[in-house]
């Protein structure tokens, strides 16, 4: 399965599995329109430590580990709330 990808900086944590990201790069294969700031719902995170923090619902620790970091999101879909559901990797 080929996913559209967006990259950018995590601006803030909204919930343990949701964050806002400033989109700085859009993958060449992407055909969708993306906003300057996208809300991302984490379907999967490619980092065992962060995955454990999400499962444990440790929002303060997630904030310390993600805010200001660059991430790559492989977009699965856009949900009914307008969020991008994605696989997330800290880069």
Image (tube, helix red, strand yellow):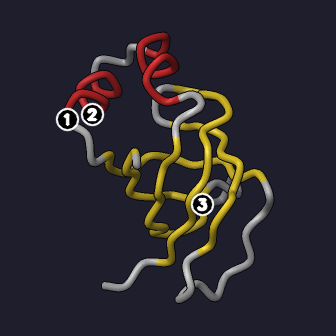
Among numbered discs 3 and 1, the one appearing first in the sequence: 1
- Residue under the image location 67 percent in, 34 percent down: 11
Residue designated by label 2: 51
- Residue under the image location 59 percent in, 31 percent down: 68
- Residue under the image location 62 percent in, 72 percent down: 26
Image-quadrant location for residue 48: top left
Which of the two residues, 73 or 42, is positioned nearer the viewer here? 73
- Residue 74 shown left or right of residue 67 in the figure: left
Image-quadrant location for residue 19: top right
| Helix, strand or loop for disc 2 | helix
Q: Disc 1 versus disc 2: distance between alpha carbons?
A: 5 Å
Q: Position of residue 25 (x, y in %)?
A: 63, 66
Residue designated by label 3: 79
Q: Position of residue 37 (x, y in %)?
A: 76, 51
Marks 3 & 1, CB-CB < 8 Å contact: no
Of marks 3 and 1, the one in the foreground: 1
Residue designated by label 1: 48
- Residue 8 shown left or right of residue 71 in the figure: right
Among numbered discs 3 and 2, the one appearing first in the sequence: 2
Q: Position of residue 27 (x, y in %)?
A: 55, 78
| Helix, strand or loop for disc 3 | loop
Q: Disc 3 versus disc 1: distance between alpha carbons?
A: 25 Å
Marks 3 & 2, CB-CB < 8 Å contact: no
| Helix, strand or loop for disc 1 | helix
Of marks 3 and 2, the one in the foreground: 2
């Amino acid at each position: 399965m080929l996913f559209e990808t967006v990259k950018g900086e995590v601006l803030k944590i909204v919930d343990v599995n949701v964050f806002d990201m400033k989109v700085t790069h859009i993958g060449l294969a992407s055909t969708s329109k993306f906003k300057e700031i996208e809300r991302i719902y984490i379907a999967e995170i490619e980092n065992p430590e962060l995955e454990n923090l999400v499962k444990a619902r440790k929002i303060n620790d997630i904030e310390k580990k993600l805010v200001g970091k660059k991430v790559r999101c492989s977009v699965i879909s856009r949900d009914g709330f307008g969020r991008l559901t994605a696989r997330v990797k800290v880069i």
